Image (cartoon, helix red, strand yellow):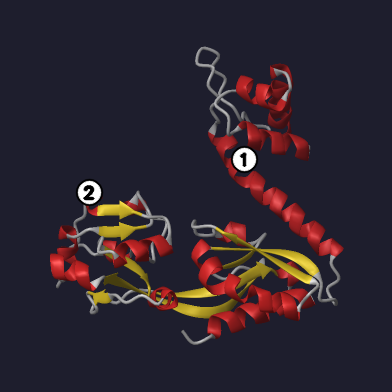
Amino acid sequence: MNLKYLKQFLQLSEFPSMSQYALKVGVTHAQVSRMVIELEKEFGFQLLVRDKTQGILKLTKKGETLVKRIPFIFREIDNMQALLKSDQDLERGVFDLYTTGYLVDYWIAPNLAKFKKDNPLITLNLFGREEMLAPEEKKTMLTVSARTKEDEDYEQIPLRDFHIGLWASEDYIKRNGKPEHVADLARHVLICFERKWPERSYPTMNWYMNNTDFMLTPSNVIIIRSSVGIMKAAQAGLGIFSLAEESIKTMGMKFERVLPHLEGPVVPMCFSYPKAWKDHVSIHKIREFLFNTFKKEL
């Protein structure tokens, strides 16, 4: 398998045409075409739709699948290199931890200086992302994310339960009234993470939408892809939102519980890592650091 071609194909997928990609990276159109053909031979499937009249680059379904998987391939290679370079019995190494931007900013980063002081030869890099981490990603990453079903490829260490509820500011409730039933939410402004709320990326956050009495239109919804942004907007009186009580306490904000009888989900947050790392002292140090960080009183 030509890894260089895989990386080039991933880059190509971000361009509107082969010609523009070729011009950007300084190669000929023929070289780009040859790269695609070689990959198609390797996989045995057509990866690009050939339509000379349009001149627009379009992936086939197989091509789309490959593009989604390529980052995992290179992440696994990076992890393998880090694993081979490290000594499992020594407290040293460079590790990347992926979680949401909110958990980076308000939970982990504030405690990172002490971790570095206590473990000078361990470097823990933090990467915030708002998309939920899929089980396939967890197999190749260090993450702090919601628990998924058990998988033999990675460990999940419970850190803290997050309790989801509906909230609004006192000002918003004074102006708009307090919903008494889930159906009343249709008359309110809801602040959500996801634009396509029926196909939501955050099912635990939007659990109340599953209620059969609840009718909602997109005009009711304002999208903010940031936990902190949602809370700040709600504090200013924008609308009703769904987040964990623990998140609100961390920010030091005050909101009123909306529909308190409507029981929200409990989301167990876990430190997840590939089982290939399970005997490494450095991973145990990181695990201990995260466990203590999330067990602190709010």
Q: Which mark is residue 66?
A: 1
Which of label 1 and label 2 is nearer to you? 2
The quadrant where residue 154 appears: bottom right
Q: Position of residue 295 (x, y in %)?
A: 54, 85
Q: Nearer the viewer, residue 33 or 78?
A: 78
Q: Residue at x 75, y 59 (%)?
A: 79
Q: Residue at x 76, y 53 (%)?
A: 77
Mark 2, residue position: 219
Q: Nearer the viewer, residue 295 or 263?
A: 295
In the current view of this chain or complex, which residue is farthest to the bottom? 297
Q: Residue at x 59, y 44 (%)?
A: 68
Q: Residue at x 72, y 55 (%)?
A: 76
Q: Is residue 250 left or right of residue 112?
A: left
Q: Nearer the viewer, residue 234 or 194?
A: 234
Query: How far separated are the C-alphas under marks 1 and 2?
Result: 36 Å
| Three-letter amino acid code at the position of disc 1 | Leu
| Three-letter amino acid code at the position of disc 2 | Ser
Q: Is residue 293 above or below residue 220?
A: below
The quadrant where residue 59 appears: top right
Q: Residues within 10 Å of mark 2 (few under 14, many from 20)?
A: few
The quadrant where residue 82 appears: bottom right
Q: Residues within 10 Å of mark 1 (few under 14, many from 20)?
A: some
As helix, strand or loop, the secondary structure at mark 1 comes to: helix
The answer to whether residue 145 is seen in the rendering is: no
Q: Position of residue 266 (x, y in %)?
A: 41, 76
Q: Is residue 6 above or below residue 186?
A: above
As helix, strand or loop, the secondary structure at mark 2 comes to: helix
Q: Nearer the viewer, residue 62 or 216?
A: 216
